[in-house]
């Protein structure tokens, strides 16, 4: 554990976790063996927050978020840490038919309740204006938790973010590009049945002659670098932190490179192994 600028605690959240290990830890001990560098009292509340999300008890979510903020845990650590592992376990249970839609909806409400508290704290860090990003969940898809986190982090990094919401038709992306003149456009998709709409939206951007003026970033659980390459996106981002780094690089190092250029894709991909 190291002290962040100011008085925030910095706790390791980038440990890769295997979902089967997570299941084992949660089912045998009700605790994950993560956050090794967190103080014990913080670690305890992290575990309670994970369970709050898994069990979908959204009215109580603030009761775990607020004490952690009082203990100087950074808002970003909560999102990348216990909130992330909690909702991952919900996804696993849903996939295994241990959970059904009502349970997932309750867990999503916990995430939303937590994000409502954390958003103002993250936005308050807002850096100087760096550029504009249009972002939206693709047509047919109603998932927005991940997209909202990305939008929030980009805003904190100094982007003017135009959020088109969920189930965004390709034509709405085109209208927003014409209206707001963004340097970056982001598509979120969480369903294998809707991810194709990322490709369709990108095709329309090309057909409308807008491809060179925007850099296209894609993300969401079923999305991969292979998929980004298949549809011709400039960057795939596994999470919000990577999205911020790549968006900043699009404005700085590669600010003069047109969207769709192969060296842009190569350079942004190379950032994953740095
Ligand atoms: C919560 C949830 C819901 C909630 C959504 C609430 C909401 N407001 O978003 C509700 C209950 C509404 C829901 C509904 C459905 N869901 Co659902 N859902 C989930 C669940 C459990 C978690 C998703 C989530 O929020 N994760 C947390 C966030 C933080 O992670 P993330 O979204 O991946 O985002 C991060 C990165 O991917 C990236 N990122 C995301 N977007 C973007 C965009 C850009 C531009 C960039 C750069 C990066 C980026 O950064 C984010 C932050 O780090 C997932 C399981 C899973 N493993 O994903 C299933 C899951 C996505 N759902 C699934 C299904 C099947 C459905 C339904 C079809 C169920 C049904 N029978 O009706 C419906 C679909 C409704 C629709 N038309 O969209 C399946 C999809 C399977 C598939 N192969 O397509 C999943 C994978 C569950 C499973 N394991 O089977 N769901």
Image (cartoon, rainbow, N blue to C red):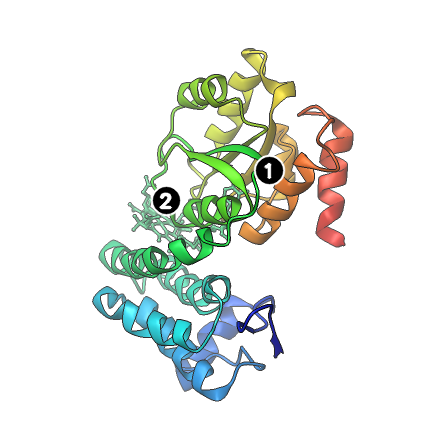
Q: Is residue 197 above or below residue 243?
A: above
Tell me if I can see residue 137 in this picture. no
Q: Which residue is mark 2?
A: 143
* Residue at x 39% of width, y 59% of height: 118
Which quadrant would the C terminus be assigned to in this image? bottom right
For marks 1 and 2, the one nearer the N-term is 1
Count of numbered labels shown in the rendering: 2
Local packing at callout 1 (Cα closer than 10 Å; few below 14, some 14-19, many 20+) is: some
Query: Residue 45 appears in which quarter of the rendering?
Result: bottom left
Query: Residue 26 appears in which quarter of the rendering?
Result: bottom left
Tell me if I can see residue 183 in this picture. yes
Which of these two is toward me, 54 or 119?
A: 119
Q: Which residue is mark 1?
A: 130
* Residue at x 25% of width, y 64% of height: 58
Q: Report if the beta carbon of the residue with label 2 is closer than 8 angstroms to ligand 1.
A: yes
Local packing at callout 2 (Cα closer than 10 Å; few below 14, some 14-19, many 20+) is: some
Q: Report if the beta carbon of the residue with label 1 is closer than 8 angstroms to ligand 1.
A: no
Q: Which mark is residue 58?
A: none
């Amino acid at each position: 554990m190291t002290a962040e600028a100011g008085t925030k605690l910095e706790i390791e959240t980038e440990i890769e976790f295997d979902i089967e290990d997570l299941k084992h830890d949660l089912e045998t001990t009700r605790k994950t063996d993560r956050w090794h560098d967190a103080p014990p009292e913080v670690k305890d509340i992290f575990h309670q927050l994970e369970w709050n999300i898994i069990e979908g008890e959204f009215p109580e979510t603030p009761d775990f978020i607020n004490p952690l903020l009082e203990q100087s845990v950074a808002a970003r650590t909560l999102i990348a840490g216990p909130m992330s592992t909690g909702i991952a376990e919900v996804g696993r249970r849903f996939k295994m038919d241990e959970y059904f839609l009502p349970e997932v909806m309750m867990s999503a409400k916990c995430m939303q309740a937590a994000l409502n508290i954390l958003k103002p704290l993250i936005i308050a860090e807002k850096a100087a204006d760096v550029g504009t990003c249009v972002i939206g969940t693709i047509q047919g898809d109603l998932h927005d938790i991940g997209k909202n986190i990305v939008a929030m982090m980009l805003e904190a990094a100094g982007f003017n973010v135009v959020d088109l919401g969920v189930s965004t038709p390709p034509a709405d992306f085109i209208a927003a590009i014409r209206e707001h003149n963004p340097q970056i456009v982001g598509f979120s998709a969480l369903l294998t049945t809707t991810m194709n709409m990322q490709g369709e939206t990108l095709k329309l951007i090309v057909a409308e002659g807008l491809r060179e003026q925007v850099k296209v970033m894609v993300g969401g659980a079923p999305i991969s670098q292979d998929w980004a390459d298949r549809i011709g996106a400039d960057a795939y981002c596994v999470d919000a932190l990577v999205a911020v780094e790549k968006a900043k690089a699009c404005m700085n190092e590669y600010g003069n490179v047109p969207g769709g250029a192969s060296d842009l894709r190569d350079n942004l991909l190379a950032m994953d192994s740095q």
